[in-house]
Amino acid sequence: MKKIKLYQLALYLFLMLFFVQKSQAQLGNVNIKQSEKIETLMEVKKELNEDGKIGDRYVIQLFYGDNGEANDILQKYRTSYNYPSRITYEAPNYKVWIGNFRNRMEADRALLKIKENFPSAFIPKPQRR
């Protein structure tokens, strides 16, 4: 009886090793072919993201009013800070916007610095483009 159990154990061990060997033999290679246009499109998207022409971006609004005051505020701002700035027109008023921040945290950090000289500055809700 003991010999049969030892024989069965050896048989089971041999079968397990055989199946383990077979299961590891399933290796393969994957080749991915993509168009060169995809690389070009990725570069264009990267440039648009850096320029702020795509996606939701945060800005800080310094002023809302007439054109003359908007230009004065913009000149005062540019003497003290380096964030990108622009005047936008929304009938019938002009807005002085600064920055092109990727997320709210960046905009909040800049707002803390800017509030020292422009206490009425705030972050409006970003617009979808």
Image (spheres, rainbow, N blue to C red):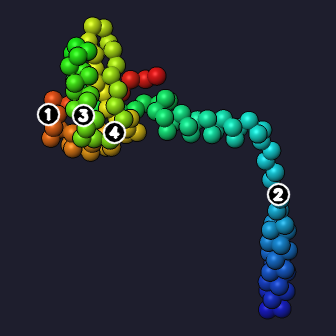
Q: CA distance from mark 2 to mark 1?
A: 62 Å
Q: Residue at x 17, y 34 (%)?
A: 118
Mark 2 lies on residue: 29
Q: Secondary structure at mark 1?
A: loop
Q: Residue at x 15, y 29 (%)?
A: 120
Q: CA distance from mark 2 to mark 3?
A: 58 Å
Amino acid type shown at disc 4: Tyr
Q: Residues within 10 Å of mark 4 (few under 14, many from 20)?
A: few
Q: Is residue 8 above or below residue 76?
A: below
Q: Earlier in the sequence, mark 2 or mark 3?
A: 2
Query: 101 or 96: which is nearer to us?
Result: 96
Q: Residues within 10 Å of mark 1 (few under 14, many from 20)?
A: few
Q: Which mark is residue 77?
A: 3
Amino acid type shown at disc 1: Pro
Mark 1 lies on residue: 119
Mark 4 lies on residue: 83
Q: Are marks 2 and 1 in contact (CB under 8 Å)?
A: no
Q: Position of residue 28 (x, y in %)?
A: 83, 59
